[in-house]
Image (cartoon, grey):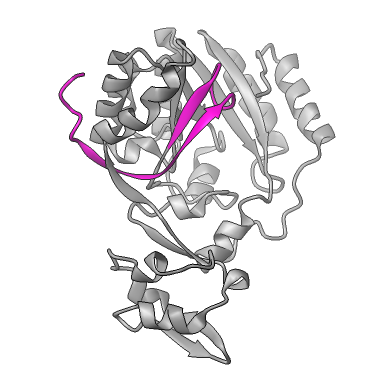
Amino acid sequence: MTGGGLTKGNILSIGHGTTKDGPGWRSIVYFKGCNFSCPWCSSPHTIPSKPVLLLYPSFAKYPERDARSCPKGAVRIEGGASVTDRSVCEDCVTFDCVRYCIDGSREVAGAEMTVDDVIREIMPYKRFHADYGVTISGGEPTCQPEFFIELLKDLKAAGFHTACETNGSSPRLADALPYLDLVMCDLKHLDDARHKELTGVTNETVIENIRAIAASGKELWIRIPVAPGFNDGENLAKTAEFVASLKGNIKAELLGYHRLGLPFWEAIGKKSPCERVVPPTETEIEAARALFRAAGVNVIET
């Protein structure tokens, strides 16, 4: 190992044995924290860097137990149901209400782990697949740059195929490239002003990083979310032209907006900006793929 094993970071979870988000069998490490605020986000509980309380009221069976479990008095009973004052929970570090919950109505999203902790959890899977890989996702991995890079170093030292899913907005992404076999970079919108309007962040560094990775010859998958009314239409045609202009080991993947993240918006006590957006049909996504293929882009489906 490289010596960075004690470096700490905030993790949402680690999934194992998937064939998505990279080639072959792999684990996915989901980082906490994201600097974008995409309206179509399917994982809003990963945006804050610190742990977040998730509530599922339909599961709640023991409101008195919930109320007794919080030493700060954030949980009270109204009309026979538990009501939680989330403003009190923002600085909570113990989440006693989750520890004592027995009905699945409360969950904390996020926990601190060291690089060694992550490697230790993933290593057993490599015994069954010599070419087993690991994808670092989020949230946004580059929001925890030191942890991100140290983890990549140790994964490479352990012989894993490495990949990351990133929004491409960090100048520190270049520091991680020597330890990455594959970069999956989102391109939310090609127009800078519209990109900033949608995400809260300019796409200037995103474009710079995409160009630099392409020029390096590193395998690059450019992922384009397709959210009706936000970044479809003319933007897709212009994005296809941009991707086609790049030289390198490049593929494009179009990802249709879906509604699977809506329960997470409810669980953090917020409404999704895309609550009423109708997801694109497979026919519409295939038409978008055809647009990219016509421009000469290698389009993949994972």
Q: Give the residue furthest to the bottom.
A: 79
Residue at 64% x, 41% y: name it: 231
Residue 285 position by quadrant: top right
Residue 46 in picture, x, y percent from top left: 44, 50
Viewer can see residue 178:
yes
Residue at 39% x, 71% y: name it: 97
4 and 292: which one is in front? 4
Residue at 31% x, 15% y: name it: 158
For the record, the magenta segment spans: 1-29
Residue at 53% x, 91% y: name it: 78
Work out whether 69 lies above or below 302.
below
Work out whether 246 lies above or below 70.
above
3 and 50: which one is in front? 3
Residue 261 in picture, x, y percent from top left: 61, 52
Q: Give the residue furthest to the right.
A: 283
User: Magenta stretch: residue 189 in it?
Assistant: no
Give the quadrant of the C terminus.
top right
Residue 180 in picture, x, y percent from top left: 38, 17
258 and 223: which one is in front? 258
Give the quadrant of the N terminus.
top left
Residue 164 in picture, x, y percent from top left: 43, 27
User: Magenta stretch: residue 21 in it?
Assistant: yes
Q: Give the residue furthest to the left.
A: 3
Query: How many marks can you see?
Result: 0
Viewer can see residue 172:
no
Residue 301 position by quadrant: top right
- Specify whether 170 is left or right of 15: left
